[in-house]
Amino acid sequence: MSKHKVLFRTLVSVGAIVTLVIVATLAFSAGLALSPQIYPIAQAADTRTTLESLPATSAQAAVQVNQDLATFEDAITQIYARALPSVVDIEVTQRVTSGSTDRFGFGQLPDGSFRRGEGSGFVWDTDGHIVTNYHVVQGAETVKVIFADGRSAQAEVIGSDPDAELAVLQVDLPAAELQPLVLGDSDALKVGQLTFAIGNPFGQDFTMTTGIVSAVGRTISGSNSSFSIPEVIQTDASINPGNSGGPLINRQGEVIGINTMIVSETGSSSGVGFAIPINTAKRIIPTLIAGEAYKYAWLGISGASLTDDIAQAMRLPAGTQGALIIEVVDNSPAAQAGLRSSQQTLSISGQEVPYGGDVIIAIAGEPITGINELIAYLAESTHPGDQVSLTVLRDGGNQENVTVTLGVRPSS
């Protein structure tokens, strides 16, 4: 099916319109607060209120609202204009395997045929490196990147990390034709800050949507990995199929994340999108560019955050928080250190839940409240071969310190 192009390439999401309405409402309300009474804009059919006929304070407030909206709009258009030369549309062809469906999930395709896929990416440096999601280029036979000005180039996948959902492409273009985006600091993000996503949702090239940081510190399951991805950014900026790999930008025009996935029952945006934090990419991408695989520290457990019901069943002090070890992988660093897995189950609301394993309440002396903090610490603050001290509570509340020598995470 040919891809339909819209007349205007810049699309602003409903989220942006809502944001503008909110700004307008707040600004207008502030203006009214300065007035002794409210003056209606619409009067009788034969009488129209103009700015000239309003009292001075109300007229000034209306002018200020308009100026504030114009400033806000201008800021958004400048963010888009500055980022646009750095964002690319990524088109891939993939060989079909048994049971594969077409790009929209309708009907199965015959073995050995090819299908087209599409995603987004952005320029990382002037050496021709383009960053995107791993699943965008997974199994790709050919990869082409297309810039907003119509230029295109064949690309080669030179490195990938399924565990972080990251991949690096290489294009052969002069440095003068490549404009890298400025990288921000995802560790400094706060809920409520503005976000802007640029990409190619549903094949609609170079679309911008806007929203806010809805949450930080999320942990999600990788689509091509058995390991979780920590410290993920949640945003309500509209993200849809085709946005994957594109940049999530702050109001300074800096990349704060790489748009990756959504939570949706329909396959389209429902206001819950996730982006890999740019600080994770900063740590991993240079290794992939160097042609090496990024090595993660590995403990060798699966677990869950401790709940009050389980803490009570294990006779732990009230209010205890930590990561409950559910399973210890055979011959893993955790197994060699003597960490204990859950051996019993507890019925909670009709569901059997494992309990009885060690509860990790601190790592390297830093208290943790649950499994997500443990995953984040291991991913961001440790390396294979490091020795770490784990503070654990055992059934009955006995506290022990266990030293573990971390291994190398096995391939997914």
Image (cartoon, rainbow, N blue to C red):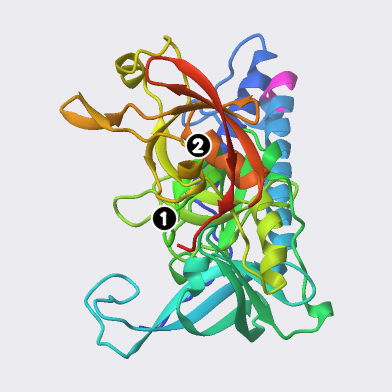
Which range of residues does the magenta coloring cover? 54-59
Q: Is residue 55 magenta?
A: yes
* Three-letter code, disc 2: Asn
Label 2's element? helix
Task: Using a 10 Å C-alpha cutoff, classify the residue at mark 2 as few (fewer than 14 neighbours), some (14 to 19) or many (20 or more).
Answer: many
Residue at horizontal 62%, vertical 67%? 293
Q: Relative to the observer, which residue lies in front, 163 or 3?
A: 163
Q: Could you tell me the amino acid type at mark 1? A: Ser
Residue 72 placement: quadrant = top right
- Judge from the rendering whether residue 212 lies leftward or rightward of residue 141; answer left or right: right
Q: Is residue 251 magenta?
A: no
Residue 216 in sight from this viewpoint: no
Within the image, what quadrant is residue 63 found in?
Answer: top right
Which quadrant is the N terminus positioned in?
bottom left
Say which residue label 2 marks: 372
Residue 91 in the image: x percent, y percent?
A: 51, 79
Number of residues whose C-alpha sits closer than 10 Å to that of mark 1, classed few (under 14), some (14–19) or many (20 or more): few
Percent x, y for residue 39? 59, 19
Q: Position of residue 394 (x, y in %)?
A: 42, 22
Residue drawn 67% across the image and 23% down it: 54
Residue 143 is left or right of residue 84, and the answer is: left
Q: Residue furthest left?
A: 350
Residue 107 seen in the figure = yes
92 over 239 or under it: above or below? below
Pick the residue in front: 284 or 324: 324
Which element type, helix, strand or loop, lies under badge 1? loop
Main SS, magenta residues: helix
How many numbered circles does the render carry?
Answer: 2
**Would you name the residue on which mark 1 appears?**
226
Disc 1 to disc 2: CB gap under 8 Å? no
- Vertical placement of residue 118 versus 244, above or below: below
